[in-house]
Structures are given as structure tokens and as C-alpha cells.
Image (spheres, helix red, strand yellow):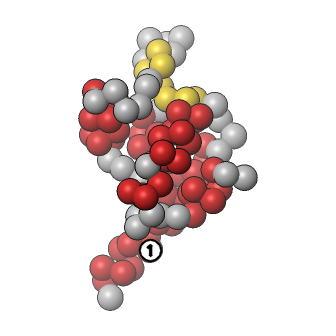
Amino acid sequence: MQDTDERILERLNNIEALLRVQNRATLRAKEAADFLGVCPRTLHDLVKAGKIRRVQLSNGRFGFRREEMERYARENEAFYADTDKAWLDAVEQ
């Protein structure tokens, strides 16, 4: 039962993260990771593997375009189907 509760809380956290950034064009690394439902280290690995592109912001830091996150999510929908479907429904609106 606790495992189910933890999964529900994780999904709710992912939905909250999506709602916070849904109208922003550029996301910080933590926000982009939350958007995809992965940890920041996994996001870094995806960038290093060339699967996700990052952009340099005016303050010298790096960010991620929301469109890029949406593209990656759509292309990898089968992978994410078990983790959280709600964010994909929201992205397609």
C-alpha cells in the first residue's frame, strides 16, 4: 500500500511541476527534469547522449526549451506510459 501511495505522490508532484511551467518557454534543469518525470542526473545524461538539446541563457546558465521537452516526451511516449500519463495529456492541449 505504501508503494502505491508513493507512486501517487510522485505523479502528483509531476503534475504540479507541469502546471508551474506550462506557460513558460524556457525551463531550468530541475523544472525540465520534473516535466519529464526524471531526476536531474538522467536529464544530464540525455543531454550528453544528444537526445535533448539545451540552450544557453543570457545569464550564462543553461536551460531547456519547453518545446524540446514536449518533443522528447512525444517521441518516447511508450517509455513514459507507465510513469505518468497526465503530463502528456496536458502537453497536447
- How far across and how far down the image is residue 48, in percent? 28, 27
Q: Is residue 51 above or below residue 75?
A: above
Q: Which of the 4 image quadrants contains residue 61?
A: top left
23 to the left or right of 21? right
Q: Classify mark 1: residues with Cα within 10 Å, few (<14), some (14-19) or many (20+).
A: few
> Is 75 left, or right, of 22 in this rendering?
left
Task: Identify the residue position indicated by label 1 in the image.
Answer: 8
Q: Nearer the viewer, residue 21 or 38?
A: 38
Which residue is at a point 47% across and 41% down the rendered structure image?
72
Q: Give residue 46's quadrant in the image.
A: top left
Residue lying at the far bottom in this picture: please name it. Answer: 1
At 48% from the left and 19% from the top, the residue drawn is 55
Q: Amino acid at mark 1?
A: Ile
Q: Does dot 1 land on a helix, a strand or a loop?
A: helix
Residue 57 in the image: state x and y as whole percent: 51, 16
Query: Residue 68: in sight, yes or no?
Result: yes
Residue in the foreground of this view, choosing between 46 and 18:
46
- Quadrant (top left, top right, bottom left, bottom right) of the N terminus: bottom left
Percent x, y of residue 34:
45, 48
Vertical arrangement, residue 41 with respect to residue 78, above or below = above
Q: Can you see residue 34?
A: no
Looking at the image, residue 18 lies above or below residue 8: above
Percent across and percent down for residue 17 are: 53, 51
Q: Identify the residue shown where x is 69% and y is 40%.
A: 23
Numbered disc total: 1
